[in-house]
Image (tube, rainbow, N blue to C red):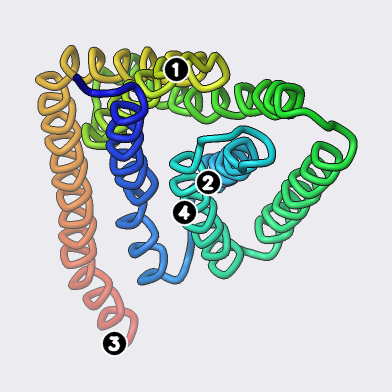
Amino acid sequence: MVSADAARTVVGILGNIISLFLFLSPVKTFIQIWKEGSVQNYSPAPYLATLMNCMVWTLYGLPMVHSHSTLLVTINGSGSAIQLAYVILFLIYSDRQKRLRVFLVLLLELFFISLLTVLVLTRVHTHKDRSMIVGIISIFFSVMMYASPLVVMKLVITTRSVEFMPFFLSFTSFANGLAWTAYAFIPFDPFIAVPNAVGSMFGLAQLILYATFYRSTKLVIGERKHKSEVDLSEVVVVIAAEDSRKVGSAPQDGGASETNGT
């Protein structure tokens, strides 16, 4: 018979692995940013939100706040470092105005987590109260992180295309929420269960949308490609027509010049 502690550890390790894949999923995007030397139209909001979420959960998992939560600290500590690296890349490759905004938000987040840590550890003196305060705050930031794909989901419904909602990211979001929801039930921890259950539902909704609009995506991309080819051919025809008019008018201009010269 497997003990509850052993089952919790196994599920927690699985959650760590899935979460790590989730945190590393934007690496391809940042390699592109690095190569092009610009963040282009990418938004720093998801990475700033995830950084804040990871820092709060790292605090929640500390032994002096919530005991027996080492696996929360390992993955969220790693996640904080990864998201901070992404934010630093935004600071390097953004224009001056965007860089200033990102820097101010980063400072605000660091100030908030520092203040929260000091207040919780110095003003609150029991594990139960510390867990409750940090746990409620963690729920808020987790739901914000999991809800961030809502904009993309709306885009999928509007365009009937999943090209901007990668399957791997949607699947890992769903699996991540599911794994940590299971972890939260051994034993029951509402502060971990609630946001991750919500995250599982958001992830499942993305997968349903993916299955619904996967086939139509190819049609949408094909129609757009065909339209761009038609537009390009029209441009070529117009340019060719203009060139032919210029060629046709050249002898007439020349003839007029000769007449005037005689």
> Which residue is pictured at 14% across the width and 43% down the height?
229
Distance from disc 4 to disc 1, alpha carbons, whole Å, reads 24 Å
| Image quadrant in which the C terminus is located | bottom left
Q: Of callouts 3 and 2, which one flags the residue occurring earlier in the amino acid sequence?
A: 2
> Which residue is pictured at 35% across the width and 71% down the height?
35
Which circle, 3 or 4, is nearer the viewer?
4
Q: What amino acid is found at the position of numbered circle 4 in the picture?
A: Ser
Which circle, 3 or 2, is nearer the viewer?
2
| Image quadrant in which the N terminus is located | top left
Q: Which residue is mark 4?
A: 78
Q: Secondary structure at mark 4?
A: helix
Is 191 situated above or below 163? above
Distance from disc 3 to disc 1, alpha carbons, whole Å, reads 106 Å
Q: Is residue 17 left or right of residue 229?
A: right
Q: Which residue is mark 1?
A: 187
Question: Of the numbered discs in the image, which one, if any, rests on residue 262?
Answer: 3
Residue 58: where, in percent of width, then height? 58, 43
Distance from disc 2 to disc 1, alpha carbons, whole Å, reads 31 Å
Q: Of callouts 4 and 2, which one flags the residue occurring earlier in the amino acid sequence?
A: 2
Q: What amino acid is found at the position of numbered circle 3 in the picture?
A: Thr
Which circle, 4 or 2, is nearer the viewer?
4
Q: Which residue is mark 2?
A: 47
Q: Secondary structure at mark 2?
A: helix
Q: What amino acid is found at the position of numbered circle 2 in the picture?
A: Tyr
